[in-house]
Amino acid sequence: MALVSYRNRFSTDSAALLDGLATAIVWLDPGLHFLYTNSSAADLLELPHSVYGRQLTDLLSGFHPLAVQLSEQIPKREIRTYREVEVSLGRRSIMLDCVATPMAEDELVLELYPLDRHLLISREDALTERHQANRMLLLRLAHEIRNPLGGVRGAAQLLESELRDPSLRDYTQIILSEVDRLNTLVETLIGPLSPPRPVPLNIHEPVEYVLRLAEAERLPDLRLRRDFDPSLPEVALDRDLLVPALINLMRNARQALSDHGTLSVRTRVERQYTIQGRRHPLAIRIDIEDDGPGVPAHLRERLFLPLVSGRKGGSGLGLAIAQDLIQRQGGLIEWRSRPGQTVFSILLPLVA
């Protein structure tokens, strides 16, 4: 919801038009106090609801170096672009390009373009293409493996029925057991083949369900934190696909922490968000954050590939499966990591 100007500068139609823009718009008075922000700016800068009349630099420390230049720019009526402005938002920061345009009555309009988001979209496109190629390869590989496995299993059963010595049946049981194990691995790799069955769902129900599973283990050194947006509407999803994806991400975070630290789950709404190459007016974001050591540098480019693991004894399937389960519902899993803060974000389009 847009923050309303105390001067009632805009009509309802104008405010609705600005709110529909993907570009973040900030309107300032001559003293660089907030007059108006559209919804994209409020979301991008994580602004509180009552910002009008407050000083720009009081809320956003990254604009301190620009404050003098912005003030000097207004009387000169010059349009200027400021590149790579770093703005601190609590525990994280974003990099922006800022176009500043003087307006009537010595006011100033800022158009903010997040550089991080453009880079992220490029990475997402590459990730989506690579995931789809991997999935096609796995499906073909599964087909080639399953056929001979079925033959081996059938032959072992026939052999077992012909054996007169019971001690020899131990060997056929080993064959059957190993064939079943390989078949289970193949099924895990390719995931469920049935199409998603979406139904209207309160996103907090499956999230809370997964959190309660973790709480049931009673791990005294693991702190679980909830930061939910209660205003989120229902979204059409397949719960049976969402829950295992959440479990995999939670397990991955816990393993990074060795069950010692803080694991936070946060829900938010995103506006004008691009997912799998399509821009959606609204999307739901579920963040799973841990304060562990971060993703090792050598794994960053291969993080969602099957059989890639940074943990000794790990299967390397959790993230690959989670990404597949979310992408099949039109969503995507993003991530960012540095020592002390790793966040995996599930993005799901909210279709009206």
Image (spheres, helix red, strand yellow):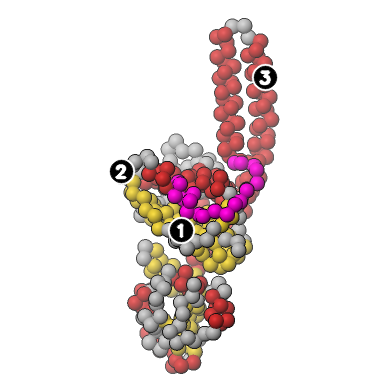
Q: Crowding at label 2, few (<14), some or many (≥20) Cα neighbours within 10 Å?
A: few
Residue 139 lies, in percent from the top left, at 65, 41
Residue 252 belongs to the span the image colors magenta: no
Residue at x 46% of width, y 72% of height: 42
Q: Where is residue 276 drawn, in percent x and y?
A: 60, 58
In the rendering, which numbered label is found on residue 155? 3
Q: Is 226 situated above or below 73?
A: above
The tag on residue 220 is: 2
* Residue position for label 1: 267
Tell whether 99 sits left or right of 90.
Answer: right
Instruction: Determine whether 85 is above or below 313 in the image.
Output: below
Q: Earlier in the sequence, mark 2 or mark 1?
A: 2
User: Which of labels 1 and 3 is toward the front?
Assistant: 1
Badge 3 density bin: few <14, some 14–19, many ≥20, Cα 10 Å: some
Q: CA distance from mark 1 to mark 3?
A: 52 Å
127 left or right, relative to 219: right
Q: Is residue 182 above or below residue 15?
A: above
Query: Residue at the location (46% across, 80% down)?
Result: 4
Residue 59 is situated, as x and y percent measured from the top left of the image, at 36, 75
Please say whether residue 320 is visible from this viewpoint: no
> In the rendered structure, which segment of residues is drawn in magenta?
191-210
Q: Crowdedness of circle 1 by 10 Å Cα count: few (<14), some, many (20+)?
A: many
Vertical arrangement, residue 36 with respect to residue 138, above or below: below
